[in-house]
Amino acid sequence: MIEIDNLADVFVEVADTLVAGFDLIEFLHTVAQHAADVSGGAVGLVLADEHGQLHYMSASGDVARELELLQLDLGEGPCLDCFRSGEVVIDTDLVRAEAQWPHFAPLAVGKGVRSVHAFPMRLRDRVIGALNVFGTEAQVLEPDEARVVQALADVATISIIQEQAIARAEVVTEQLQAALNSRIVVEQAKGAVARALGISVNEAFVLLRERARHTRTPLTGLAYDLVNAPETIEDRLRRE
């Protein structure tokens, strides 16, 4: 287990993963490894998609990966309970958990796993996944260890939600910029048509819209063509 004095280094390394480009898999692997160091167990991470379906994302080793996939396949287990309730599942002895998880518990014990602890990846009322610790003994996490593991889960949650917000904002910004660029092209086309045909700008816009609808051409596309080839304006906009 990691020394408490080294915890600052742990969180600095986790934060460093966020600085130069966000690689979700690398980030979650870093979180899983540090959670394993803190707890002394094997750690796995599952995240929910936009439909609330859980998916395996990362693990500190093969055993944790197998157990996460097993839970998802069976539809039962501590990570699913933790995700659904948003509450910690801690200090559970799998030998005595067959009534709780009749399929998962005996299979996990058969793989040499005795204890499990599941921590929600939650921000307020939003739960995006779970971080799970598996032990080969009936292990009881010390309160300090449990707090640190939950803190790692919290850091991961906040980072992922923040990254999603940034990604959405970038998409909105790109859409807005595209709309602004389209408006500029249309304004340029209105001016070019008005000059070429000796009509007002408003009349030019009406003509552009009519021609775009008649030819089933996007208005922006027609405007772009006319701006780049103004000599075609009379031919392309001649009234039938």
Image (tube, helix red, strand yellow):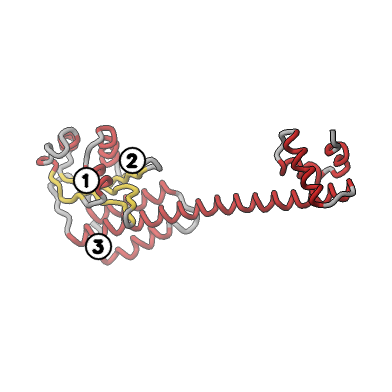
Q: Residue 219 in the image: x percent, y percent?
A: 72, 42
**How far apart, in angstroms, are the residues tagged by discs 1 and 2?**
18 Å
Question: Does label 2 or label 3 sit earlier along the sequence?
Answer: 3
Quick check: 21 left or right of 159? right
Dot 1 lies on which element? Answer: strand
From the image, tell me which residue sits under label 2.
54
Identity of the amino acid at label 2? Leu
The residue labelled by disc 1 is: 134
Q: Considering only order in the chain, which callout, 1 or 3, is on the residue closer to the N terminus?
A: 3
Residue 202, percent from left and from top: 79, 51
Label 2: how many Cα within 10 Å (few below 14, some 14–19, many 20+): many
Q: Amino acid at mark 3?
A: Glu
Residue at the disc numbered 3: 3
Residue at image position (55%, 52%) is 172
C-alpha gap between disc 3 and disc 1: 20 Å
**Quadrant of the rendered image containing residue 56:** top left
Q: Position of residue 108 (x, y in %)?
A: 19, 37
Front-most of 44 and 179? 179
